[in-house]
Image: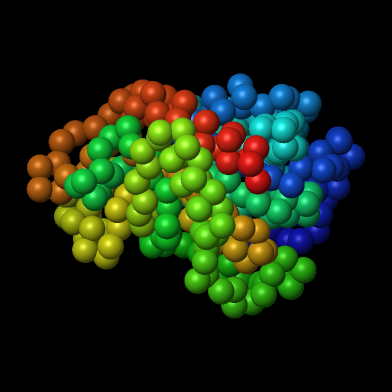
Amino acid sequence: MIGIEKINETASFLQKAGLTDAKIGIVLGTGLGNLVSEIEIEKEIDYQNIPNFPLSTVEFHSGKLIYGKLGGKQVLAMQGRFHFYEGYSMDEIVFPIRVMKLLGIEQLFISNAAGAINKSFKKGDLMLIDDHINLQPNALIGKNYDDLGPRFPDMSEAYHSTLKKAIKETAKSNDITIQEGIYASVPGPMLETAAEYRWIHTLGGDAVGMSTVPEVIAASHMGIPCVAISVLTDECDFDDLQPVNIQEIIEVAGKAEKKLTLLFKETIKNL
């Protein structure tokens, strides 16, 4: 388990590097890293140069911490995240979120690429996550650090109602259609079978992916309000399941990214 001393060590390193006054954190998902082009970058640091940071092994994740302004607000963005299927422990996956807390982050915006299980959703749609179903191990298992949060954190509002409302208002004012639903988080890396999609659908899941929930749990534990949007990159029709390749997923994510970027930028601007 990664101890509080390493979290403090990394936060101290980044503070000395000048990452001192961002209040908004952003985590960018698979194929969604180009939002960085909208940030007025003041500093960027490769993960490999940050003490105790894991390294992203996914080719579609750049592995940089970006500090600058978006929508006139100071932000700290992860261009590349960490996944359980890469072999990381849950402590390693949520380590950057815990560091963000010590750096002063007060709100967290998260994006991901996900498969649509709800048959009324189509690939290329955006889905605002209303709640989640966690089918991965839990990052809070083990020793609790009281400096970060309570032993038994409440999860009744893991996705903050005020931030969700702000996203929906931004979508409406910019004529962007956005779905709303439940995100199921699975270990990966394989895509699911038809029977597994049917099971997740029965549980109440509208979309499925391999990230986000560990980060949200860690943020909720520390009292950081979160909002998350999935780009739905494929349709998981469990009655007529078709093969999907990762390149198609990346292409669909790229096409939808402009809408996602606008939603995040304008919502942050209006906070």
| Left or right side of 238 for 82 | right
Residue at (65, 51) in percent of width and height: 107
Q: Residue at x 42, y 48 (%)?
A: 128
Could you say where residue 239 lies in the image, as x and y percent from the top left? Answer: 10, 48
In this view, 34 is above or below 114: above
Task: From the viewer's side, name the closer residue of 106 and 8.
Answer: 106
Residue 32: give x, y in percent of width and height.
49, 31
Nearer-the-camera pick, 57 or 270 = 270
Residue 224 visible in the snapshot: yes
* Relative side of 261 to 72, left or right: left
Residue 83: tell me if it is visible: no
2 vs 81, nearest the viewer: 81
- The percent position of residue 262, horizontal first and vertical second, equals 52, 31
**Rendered image coloring scheme:** rainbow
Q: Residue furthest left?
A: 239
Q: Picture coordinates of residue 139 (x, y %)?
A: 56, 62
Name of the residue lying farthest toward the bottom: 152
Count of picture labels: 0
29 lies left or right of 116:
right
Location of residue 246 (image quadrant): top left
Identify which residue is drawn at 50% across, 53% down: 164
> Which quarter of the rendered picture does the N terminus lie within?
bottom right
Left or right: 10, with 77 as reference point: right
User: Could you tell me which residue is drawn at 61 percent across and 22 percent down?
Assistant: 37
Q: Which residue is at the far right?
A: 16
